[in-house]
Image (cartoon, coloured by chain):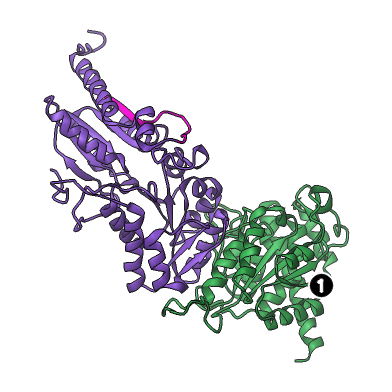
Chain colours: A green, B purple
Amino acid sequence: MNREELVARLQAKAKKLRRESLFVMKEMGGGWLGGSFSSADFITALYFYRMKHDPQKPLWNDRDRLIISKGHACEVFYAALAEAGYIPRKDLKTYSHLGSRLQTHVDCRTPGIDCSGGSLGLGLSFAVGTALGAYISPDQTNLKADIRQQEARFRVYCVLGDGECNEGQVWEAAANAFHYRLDNLTAIVDSNKFQSTGPVQMKLNMLSLAEKFKAFGWEIKEIDGNNLYEVTDALDWAVAVKGRPQAIIAHTIKGKGFPSLENTNCHFLKITDELVKKGLEALGE
Amino acid sequence: MKSRYVRKIRDIQENMYASHNHALIELAGKNKKVISCYADFPPGEAGEVFQQKFPDRMIDVGIAEGHLITSAAGLADAGFIPFTHCHALFAVGRGYNQIRQNVAYDNRNVKIVFCNSGVIWGGIGPSHLVVEDFAALRAIPNLVILSPSDAVSSEKATLAAAEYVGPVILRLPSVGASYPTLYTTDLDFQIGKSIPLHDGNDVAILATGILVSDALRTSEELETEGIHARVLDIQTIKPLDEKAVLAAARRTGAVVTVEDASIIGGLGGAVAELLSENYPVPMRRVGVRDQFGESGTSDEIKKCYGLTSPFIKKAVWGVLKAKKKKAGAPKRKASGK
């Protein structure tokens, strides 16, 4: 498969995940549409291009981890898990209902989720912990002073929101990631420029997140997070970086794929039949 | 019946943090999954020995207690059994959401060691002296809370915590001080099982942590006054040994709780909740009376905050008086007759 074919395939998959996520949101009658749609492209690339994982073995010890720190944009993740085969597609209908294993923020009770989300700012710390653990074998002791083995057992990807980067613990984690030279750790910031109640610059101006991660010792790449050529290139780049964690600042459009909502603060919307219909039309269904 | 593991002569004092770290050394030697994590907190002599023996099993995250706990959950995901160490107040204060969400809710096999707990150690002053930890933690579901009372039980509690699969809080007092050793080294420590230290049917003294020693001494002094106290070391705050607490209440009809923590929501709170629903008896809680701690020597603080033998005795006399009054009260007549 050449590059064009790969990207075309991933684009089609991302469109499918956006469509399915609308149906997931409909179950609750409300959804984090903006953040689900902005992240759909790199989520697709992670699950269906980059990550080493096995939906039949969600607890495989050496699987790559995907930590969804921005745990509210769960609808597109659930669509991805169903598409990948972690959960049966019919489970998507149970979202938000009593007893469901699809809770309204990502939750460990769902196969394929390793860290429950909802409380912003924690996921990167979890990612650092597990990435560090990947460099130590639980079966043998390395009696040398240096904590690290030669090869990490697995890679760790962590998806953060740009608003989420207001939280202080993100930076505790960022400092530790560089201190421990966790080059098996890639953070992807879904920089869609809006947080819950308004534009990120107006709420709390964090200036350049790229510069911030760089100042913390990370290797950084800024990309158009809705362009699958750039997304796949960035994920390839990350794997090749040695000695430092990588931060991909994915500049995305909130609500990407739903033109009338794009670049508005569509953080959380009431999801009506009409809106679903409009969304499906926009996505070319 | 009094436990056979209680030392007949209690003439030595040992450091509970050191014995905890000795247990970690023993564990790490047998189980490569054990990892010791710190937030720029002193490991102590024994902790440094651990570091020398297992350099790749010791991690310091810097002054970042929230990250300490969440990253420990990540280490557990990677296949390890992490023990985290920092000031108790910052673990529960700066790490509360993390304990609740990343460890308890996600059921991660993480053991959170609360160091320098309580007010008695005086230490670095009120910013570091936690009274509210038991109260805050008890209400978090899926959490075991251990509160050993001496160096032997601290070691055994560490071993038990490692064997238990799930979230554990291990509460230790001042890491720099030594406390009377109560138990023989073959103590059989079981999570959720209190340890009887003294027999008696007049009053039950339920104590936890370093004040267990004071409770035991008080019960021996009370003997000379003809008061026979049943003393239990409540070494697990959650799950509470309900069977033993209820049995003590039934047998004695009068209960005193003793803890180096707030009387609100800690051991006293837990016992009051249980007894009020199942077997209400007169109760008194000895502990920190809704106050912050302060700097001072341990002896000064104990006296000032009502955490000494005389205060325990006063509470005992109080419940005995209330018990007598209750016993002497006329029985109610059936209505309508």
Query: Where residue A70 sits in the image (x, y, percent)?
Result: 67, 59
Quadrant including the N terminus of chain B = top left
Magenta-highlighted residues: B282-295
Query: Where residue A16 sits in the image (x, y, percent)?
Result: 74, 72
Q: Is residue B155 left or right of residue A242?
A: left
Q: Is residue B7 visible?
A: yes
Q: Is residue A260 left or right of residue A25?
A: right
Q: Does B288 appear in magenta?
A: yes
Is B310 located above or below residue A237 in the figure?
A: above
Q: Does B120 appear in magenta?
A: no
Q: Quick one: which residue is furthest to the top in this view?
A: B337
Label 1 chain ID: A
Question: Residue at 44% of width from left, 76% of height from top?
Answer: A138
**Disc 1 residue type?**
Ile
Q: Residues within 10 Å of mark 1 (few under 14, many from 20)?
A: some
Could you say whether the residue bearing mark 1 is in a helix, strand or loop?
strand
Is B328 located above or below residue A43 in the figure?
A: above
Q: Quick one: which residue is furthest to the right in this view?
A: A260
Q: Is residue B163 visible?
A: no
Is A43 located above or below residue B119 in the figure?
A: below
Looking at the image, which is closer to me, B318 or A1?
B318
Query: Where residue B218 sits in the image (x, y, percent)?
Result: 21, 32
Question: Residue at 73% of width from left, 62% of height from top?
Answer: A36
Is A284 located above or below residue B335 in the figure?
A: below
Query: Where residue A27 sits in the image (x, y, percent)?
Result: 66, 55
Q: Quick one: which residue is furthest to the front in this view?
A: B297
Which quadrant holds residue A8?
A: bottom right
State the residue position of label 1: A223
Q: Is residue B7 left or right of residue A273?
A: left
Q: Is residue B244 left or right of residue A81?
A: left
Which quadrant holds residue B26?
A: bottom left
Looking at the image, which is closer to me, B46 or A10?
B46
